[in-house]
């Protein structure tokens, strides 16, 4: 605890202690006030300004310290100052005092509460940030909630001080007015408990609910206005209709069918979406072939004669196509119809919040889920329209190896594909605008990957902006200059690089147009995705969205994760809705070395000013990594300072995507490093690294005093 907090606690403690030690509470009783009313009123008449200042000071101090007697001070205000002045003085004094109590709680407790319970309070804090003024106003209007407790709790939230002040001023006014009126007749009061009758309590409680009732009414009016152009069906063909058969759409429809809802799944192209046909599955099949090529380069180190075999590019790409076909049945129409999903091939178009037109037929559904995915981003680059460029969608049609592949983009997709092509013997030049690959990762991680890419034959150019592209069709023959030329700039430096194939790997754009969202007025988020609330609903409650089209993450596993929330909220939302939980989201980049992460890394923690402690274990010290010849890499865990609670973990090395799962499990279920350390791991495995990093944390937090006493104890036992 810093000096300022300690000093404030000391001052507050002394003042509160003096209040009780001097028995000042005896002056804040109804009897004492009634006995002194005439004398106080006379003194106020002769020293009005001084009396006002003294009264306000006492009231502010009492409220700021949460001392008992605020109700008596309110009664006394009107008893000696009159109704008008009493109401004015009490209203401002109580609000100023409450704000000081609020600031004290924020200064003394908020950091500690956030550090200890931040993850548990995340949803509450988000709600307060959005609707804090409504919550506060209701609490102030309802006299059942002790005001000192409101001051304390609100100090732990992100509500602004100015908002807290004016809402408190407004919210406490009705109750203050009741007490001021009672104070004007103080001579007839026998107890402060008589002031708020049951009827008045009910009236004030209903008044406290008014902000939410008004907000709800406004929302309903806006929704009615939104639905006005459309006629709600009297009956529906389906309980749920899903547009798009990628990961999000498949899982949503499967869950709906599993709970016996009638569900339709509409897909205009191929079942399985991008992940099966042009993303996860083909890229991992290509990476497997590339990894075999990399293994051959290690032949001598593993005790074999150097391998001379070369990749057959056409055969590799045919294998990729074969893998897609082998996985295809998992996402097929036959499988999903067997699960109870009605699969419809065709292009969907939303006609109303409950109607979708497919192949000229109108289908009605209580809820519609948009799962249309995303497509590769194509930049507005001069000359690009004339170039037959590749994307992660079209790449898989290649059968002739490029003479030199140019890759624009240094994110996960660009790095995975650049490395794979290079390992297959194809010269690759990769260009990234940022000053490092994988801009979201720490510099050390990016540098480790860039060094490996260079060893694998990739020429990496970071910090270069592509200004234009030129295409020379006559230069496509093998013995002629390369046809594609990129002009790059970095500051005042300019260079031109050449290739015969250009791969765009610059991220993905949500598919939000061409199927009726614009005509309906479905709102979009600033990033171009469909705007959804925490329950994955759009501005139309009957229309939800999942996966890449909704964000905030564009991962297959996140789309599947969202699918449960969308299906359950759509089918059972009238009873209970669930907010999508994004607190523990793992990511993996399947390069060599693999890079996997969950939670925060140092870069993000520092940017968000989150205190952390770092524990690290080098894979070079792991027996299995030494035996496998995979010693490069590390495990790094961020924890709350002095505690075993995990804030994030990063693994760089072989099978990092598999090994991160233990940290995902630990974070999801609030298990600290101590639980991982206490878990038996098979020997020798790469997973042991997770246990060893936990051991490193434990070693750094040894109870030195206890160990010193134990050493003395054992020495005594030896008779030394």
Image: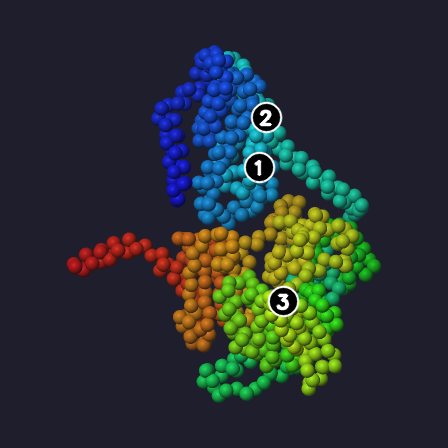
> Residue at the spot x=69%, y=65% of the render?
379
Sequence order check, earlier mark of 2 and 1: 1
- The residue nearer to you, when weighing 189 against 650, is 650
Q: Is residue 240 visible?
A: no
Q: Which residue is mark 2?
A: 174
Q: Nearer the viewer, residue 691 or 154?
A: 154
Location of residue 715 with respect to 52 vertically, above or below: below
Determine the secondary structure under disc 1. helix
SS for dot 3:
strand
- Residue wearing tag 3: 465
User: Splitting the image into 4 quarters, where does residue 88 fall?
Assistant: top right
Q: Which mark is residue 163?
A: 1
Eyeballing the image, is 2 above or below 327? above
Q: Considering only order in the chain, which callout, 1 or 3, is on the residue closer to the N terminus?
A: 1
Where is residue 185 drawn, in percent x and y?
Answer: 54, 14
Q: Nearer the viewer, mark 3 or mark 2?
A: 3
């Amino acid at each position: 605890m810093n000096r300022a907090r300690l000093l404030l606690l000391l001052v507050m403690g002394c003042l509160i202690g003096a209040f009780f030690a001097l028995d000042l509470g005896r002056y804040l009783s109804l009897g004492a006030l009634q006995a002194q009313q005439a004398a106080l009123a006379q003194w106020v008449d002769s020293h009005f300004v001084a009396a006002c200042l003294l009264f306000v000071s006492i009231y502010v101090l009492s409220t700021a310290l949460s001392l008992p007697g605020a109700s008596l001070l309110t009664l006394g205000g009107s008893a000696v100052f009159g109704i008008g002045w009493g109401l004015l003085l009490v209203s401002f004094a109580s609000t100023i005092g409450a704000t000081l109590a609020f600031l004290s709680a924020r200064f003394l407790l908020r950091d500690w509460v956030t550090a200890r319970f931040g993850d548990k309070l995340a949803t509450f804090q988000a709600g307060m940030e959005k609707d804090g003024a409504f919550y506060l106003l209701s609490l102030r209007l309802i006299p059942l909630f002790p005001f000192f407790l409101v001051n304390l709790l609100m100090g732990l939230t992100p509500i602004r001080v100015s908002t807290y002040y004016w809402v408190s001023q407004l919210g406490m006014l009705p109750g203050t007015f009741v007490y001021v009126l009672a104070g004007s007749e103080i001579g007839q009061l026998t107890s402060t408990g008589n002031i708020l009758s049951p009827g008045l309590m009910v009236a004030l409680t209903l008044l406290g609910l008014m902000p939410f009732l008004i907000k709800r009414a406004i929302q309903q009016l806006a929704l009615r206005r939104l639905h006005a152009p459309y006629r709600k069906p009297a009956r529906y063909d389906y309980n749920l209709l899903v547009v798009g058969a990628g990961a999000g759409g498949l899982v949503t429809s499967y869950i709906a069918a599993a709970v016996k809802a009638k569900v339709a799944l509409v897909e205009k192209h191929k079942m399985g979406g991008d992940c099966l046909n042009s993303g996860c599955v083909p890229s991992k099949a290509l990476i497997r072939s590339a990894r075999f090529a990399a293994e051959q380069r290690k032949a001598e180190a593993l005790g074999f004669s150097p391998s001379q075999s070369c990749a057959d590019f056409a055969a590799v790409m045919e294998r990729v196509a074969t893998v897609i076909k082998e996985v295809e049945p998992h996402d097929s129409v036959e499988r999903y119809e067997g699960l109870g999903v009605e699969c419809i091939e065709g292009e969907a178009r939303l006609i109303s919040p409950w109607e979708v037109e497919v192949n000229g037929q109108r289908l009605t559904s209580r809820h519609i889920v948009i799962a249309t995915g995303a497509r590769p981003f194509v930049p507005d680059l001069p000359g690009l329209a004339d170039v037959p460029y590749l994307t992660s969608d079209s790449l898989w049609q290649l059968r002739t190896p490029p003479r030199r592949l140019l890759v624009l983009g240094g994110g996960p997709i660009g790095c995975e594909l650049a490395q794979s092509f290079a390992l297959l013997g194809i010269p690759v030049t990769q260009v990234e605008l940022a000053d490092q690959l994988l801009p979201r990762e720490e510099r050390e991680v990016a540098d480790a990957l860039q060094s490996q890419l260079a060893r694998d034959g990739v020429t990496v150019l970071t910090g270069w902006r592509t200004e234009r592209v030129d295409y020379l069709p006559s230069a496509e023959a093998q013995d002629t200059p390369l046809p594609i030329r990129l002009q790059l700039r970095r500051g005042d430096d300019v260079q031109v690089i050449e290739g015969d194939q250009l791969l765009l790997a610059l991220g993905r754009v949500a598919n939000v147009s061409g199927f009726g969202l614009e005509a309906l007025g479905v709102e979009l988020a600033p990033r171009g995705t469909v705007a959804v609330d925490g329950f994955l609903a759009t501005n139309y409650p009957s229309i939800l969205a999942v996966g890449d089209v909704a964000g905030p993450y564009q991962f297959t596993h996140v789309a599947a994760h969202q699918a449960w929330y969308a299906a359950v909220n759509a089918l059972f939302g009238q009873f209970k809705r669930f907010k999508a939980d994004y607190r523990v989201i793992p990511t993996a980049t399947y390069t060599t070395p693999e890079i996997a992460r969950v939670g925060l890394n140092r870069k993000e923690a520092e940017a968000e000013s989150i205190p952390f402690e770092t524990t690290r274990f080098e894979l070079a010290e792991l027996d299995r990594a030494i035996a496998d010849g995979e010693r490069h890499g590390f495990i790094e865990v961020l924890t709350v300072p002095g505690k075993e609670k995990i804030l994030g973990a990063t693994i760089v090395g072989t099978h990092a995507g598999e090994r991160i799962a233990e940290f995902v499990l630990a974070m999801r279920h609030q298990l600290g490093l101590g639980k991982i350390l206490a878990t038996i791991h098979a020997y020798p495995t790469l997973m042991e690294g997770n246990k060893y990093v936990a051991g490193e944390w434990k070693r750094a937090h040894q109870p030195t005093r206890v160990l010193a006493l134990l050493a003395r104890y054992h020495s005594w036992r030896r008779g030394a």
